[in-house]
Amino acid sequence: MKKRIVLALGGNALGNTLVEQMRAVKTTAKSIAGLLRDGDEVVIAHGNGPQVGMINMAMELAHKSEATIPFIPMSVCVAMSQGYIGYDLQNALREELLDRGQSVPVASIITQTLVAEDDPAFQKPSKPIGSFYSEEEAKEMSSRGYDMMEDAGRGWRRVVASPKPIDIVEKDVIKALLAAGQVVVAGGGGGIPVIAQGNHLKGVSAVVDKDLASAKLAEIIDADYLIILTAVEKVAVNFRKDNERWLDTITPDEAQKYIEEGQFAPGSMLPKVEAAMQFATSRPGRKSLITLLEKAEEGIAGKTGTTISL
């Protein structure tokens, strides 16, 4: 039976630089194309942490070095990252599908995510973006006014506000494209964060977590599966300890228990598990899967990955 799937691509599916990204999306396209063999409807969401950080830093440096170059707000940087990541993804996927004899249109949608103006996240930046830095480099950046945070033992990164997604503005466009048999790239980088001021949507300086935004998008378009693709095949408790245990199938209640135990690193596995729980509890029958990109088909078949469902 045909399924509606939202794929949330992690950073490992995109690389950290333009050259890495162009290589990575070719491999990514092969895995995604495999999911389309059975006629499933697929929406591809993706992260943008390294890319939006690079764009924002470059724009700030340009503005500081040349007064005629305007300051570019974070919301516009997110839009720019959606454009150039979507460009690479849709072209790589189109080529892969044509090589397989599948003529399926692929379209990237500049996507806005509605957030609340009074979201407390604006007072406590927590979303890592950009490159990793040493502690010494992080201290120097902090002295220049940047908020910095250690990221799951991997180094220090700049952090920005990460408000919760309330709605996906372009949801009806996405539904229409799916109904027309197209593959859709949407919600890139969690979507461009906007607040509503009457009929006007105002961009705000933030980055919405792409996994939580993907869960909201999957819920709104009535998807059957949310597949969160990351750097590990399964979710683990007691990660990298002697008593490490990989999880196959868990309930939202079990996931919540592990969260309360502090089993999942903030900025890493924690938002993925929270997003998976959010979607799985939004309606009976919905399933979330966390696994490797190249294992997505096996995960749907129940052969690997961590499935969260009621």
Image: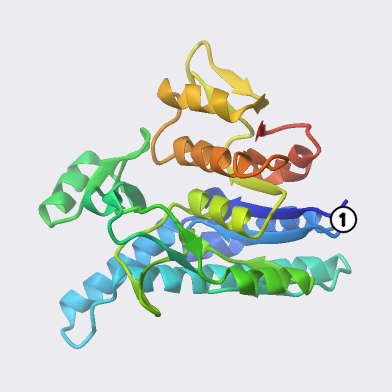
Residue nearest the viewer, comparing 293 with 137: 293
Residue nearest the viewer, comparing 148 with 271: 271
Residue displayed at 53% across by 59% down: 20
Q: Is residue 92 visible?
A: no
Label 1 sits on what residue type? Asp
Residue 132 rendering spot, x and y as whole percentages = 34, 47
Residue 113 rendering spot, x and y as whole percentages = 46, 64
Res. 216 image quadrant: bottom right
Residue nearest the viewer, comparing 74 with 223: 223
Q: Quadrant of the C terminus?
A: top right
Q: Is residue 31 left or right of residue 112?
A: right
Res. 78 image quadrant: bottom left
Q: Is residue 98 above or below residue 287?
A: below
Disc 1: which residue: 38
Q: Is residue 23 left or right of residue 224?
A: left
Tally of marks: 1
Residue nearest the viewer, comparing 219 with 27: 219
Residue displayed at 18% across by 42% down: 136
Residue 264 rendering spot, x and y as whole percentages = 45, 29
Q: Is residue 306 above or below residue 216?
A: above
- The single residue placed furthest to the bottom in the displayed view is 68
